[in-house]
Amino acid sequence: MCYMKQSINILVSGGGTGGHIYPAVAIANELKKRFPKANFLFVGAKDRMEMEKVPQEGYDIKGLWITGIQRKLTFTNLLFPFKLISSLWNANKIINQFKPDIVIGTGGFASGPTLYMASLKNIPTLIQEQNSFPGITNKLLAKKARVICVAYDGLERFFPKDKIIKTGNPVRQDLLDISSKRNEALDFFKLEKNKKTLLVLGGSLGARAINKLIASNIDWLVEQGIQLVWQTGKLYIDEYTIFNKKNNVQTHAFLHRMDLAYSASDIIISRAGAGSISELCMVGKPVVFIPSPNVSEDHQTKNAMSVVEKSAAVLLKESELDSFQIVFGKFINDIELQKSLSNNIKKLELPTATQHIANEVEKLLGKF
């Protein structure tokens, strides 16, 4: 599509967690390929991980003084009205200076004020909603958004149906062909070829409940002939490095080669963040989801259920972890179940999500 303006200004807002940052960067990268002369600017929340991660990807970012509302009465909550006013003021200032042709929001604290102020100025906005159950910010922003890109069916319960386009979530492009990397992956992690490999994922920061579960069942898992690649997260790595002394167990604060980690694995235990689920659909390995119950609207459980209902994964709630050996014992001994789950989750992949979202951005740029 031809766009007549000499240079395009694209404002992107998303952050707080990798689940919001990665899609934002992936969309920007795809648009940069299509519009090499475009100007990009990110807006994030001060003191959040996007302020470090986005510049590492080569993009400029401005920070707003904004946080979410805590579930209990705290000093942070008392500051929230002041933070909101400050963020709306500064978002307006950024928009006036940058003069974006379009504003893209992938979720996170900063996207609320940024997209709200853009919509007041009649600048086209696009929301990329990763979860099966959206948060309150995107529900409010949806009223003025021109397009809402989603990854799950059934979101017309929350958003205007005529604005919804099912694109899927952007995922790492190096996951498109992990099957060809199997031998490289086994060598990379120094794994035995004749043993099943369990990959344990708790997110970049880590998941306390999953770490405690694995630690308390480590001997039992090794007895089952399983070798572990265990991502503890950076908050917990010091606590669990002791397990590296055990045969067939290795802990990592962070897995820099996720493509090889997925390729080496036979079974995966994971949280149920939207980004993780989209990746796991592409990977096509049997998965046990242990959703975090500590997220807004319990959206991880809802994400996981959307996969489990299609007979594509197993769900184990944190409240049910006492039954881990029974559930997981049946799982690792049932090869047919593993094959069935693997086939079914692979059917849910949407590998061209990033390109599809970029197409919608192009349409908006052409229209407005």
Image: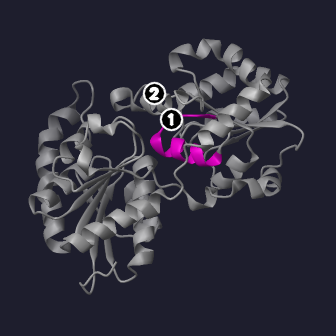
278 displayed left or right of 89: right
Name the residue tied to disc 2. 301
Residue 110, horizontal then vertical, whole percent: 26, 51
Quarter of the image where one finds residue 94: bottom left
Magenta stretch, main secondary structure, is helix
In the image, 278 versus 269, the foreground residue is: 278
Q: Are marks 2 and 1 in contact (CB under 8 Å)?
A: yes
Alpha carbon separation for disc pair 2 and 1: 7 Å
Q: Quadrant for residue 134, please give it.
A: top left
Q: Is residue 135 magenta?
A: no
Nearest the camera: 148 or 32?
148
**Picture coordinates of residue 353 (x, y %)?**
46, 56
Density class for disc 1 (Cα within 10 Å; few <14, some 14-19, many ≥20) is: many
Q: Residues within 10 Å of mark 2 (few under 14, many from 20)?
A: many
- Residue range highlighted in magenta: 269-283
Q: Position of residue 166 (x, y in %)?
A: 39, 49
Question: Which element type, helix, strand or loop, lies under badge 2?
Answer: helix
Residue with the most extreme front position = 162
Q: In the image, residue 273 lies at what x, y percent? A: 47, 39
Quadrant the C terminus occupies: bottom left
- For the point 81% across and 27% down, the residue is 222
Q: Is residue 39 left or right of residue 188?
A: left
Q: Looking at the picture, which amino acid does disc 2 mark?
A: Thr
In which quadrant of the rendered image does the N terminus lie?
Answer: bottom left
Query: In the rendered structure, which amino acid carries the disc numbered 1?
Result: Ala
Q: Residue at x 40, y 71 (%)?
A: 31
- For residue 12, which numbered disc appears in the image? none
Q: Secondary structure at mark 1?
A: loop
Residue 272 has which mark?
1
The vertical placement of 48 against 201, above or below, is below
Is any part of residue 364 visible from this angle? yes
For residue 268, above or below residue 221: below
